[in-house]
Image (cartoon, rainbow, N blue to C red):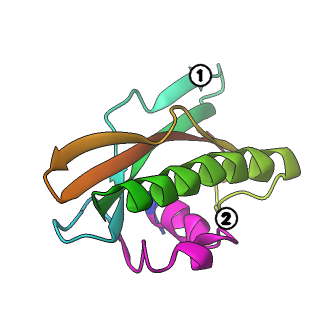
Amino acid sequence: MSVAVQVKKFIETCPFLEEFENLFPSVSINKLDESPTMYSIEETPAEPIVKRYANGDSVRQYVFSLCSCELYGAVENEKTSEFYERFSDWLEDCTRKNVLPELSGQLQSKSIRATTNGYLYDNQSSICQYRIQCQFLYFKRR
């Protein structure tokens, strides 16, 4: 399976995701519907190789944003902000505990983290889009 699919599967294991199920009932990759309460993992353009070793091995990154389409309002905004704050903390905890996306073959997970806070990306009156940018590092043997 691709790194993107493994990251998606990993994010779906987030223990408090169920609490926010009304906010985020479905997930996709690179496809965020304009309907409220959807989320998507969107690939972010970035140099894939962070470090290359003389033997051809490399440390690589998969840079992505977790995006959500939400209803725009005071109560909804507070819940969404809480979700993204907890999501960022959860990624840090996973790296610290070495609980990471499962890769196979020549790939080995190293870390996952949020590189920004959750933020309002687009607002269209009663519907808005939030996102948090993240980085997943992994080792690839030649």
- Counting labels gives 2
**4 sits left or right of 70 in the view:** right
Residue type (three-letter) at the residue carrying disc 2: Glu
From mark 1 to mark 2, how far is it between C-alphas?
Answer: 21 Å
Decide: few, some or many residues near mark 2? Use Cα within 10 Å; few <14, some 14-19, many ≥20.
some
Question: Would residue 106 be seen by someone viewing this image from the given angle?
Answer: yes
Residue closer to the observer: 119 or 91: 119
Residue closer to the observer: 1 or 69: 69
Residues rendered magenta in the picture: 5-28
The residue located at (65%, 68%) in the rendering is: 14
Decide: few, some or many residues near mark 1? Use Cα within 10 Å; few <14, some 14-19, many ≥20.
few
Q: Is residue 93 magenta?
A: no
In the figure, residue 34 lies in which quadrant?
bottom left
In the figure, residue 121 lies in which quadrant?
top left
Q: Secondary structure at mark 1?
A: strand
Q: Is residue 10 magenta?
A: yes
Q: Which residue is mark 2?
A: 102
The percent position of residue 13, horizontal first and vertical second, equals 64, 73
Q: Residue furthest front?
A: 74
Q: Secondary structure at mark 2?
A: loop
**68 sits left or right of 98 in the view:** left
Relative height, residue 69 to residue 117 (above, below): below
**125 sits left or right of 142 in the view:** left
Q: Which mark is residue 108?
A: none
Q: Which mark is residue 51?
A: 1
Disc on the earlier residue, 1 or 2: 1
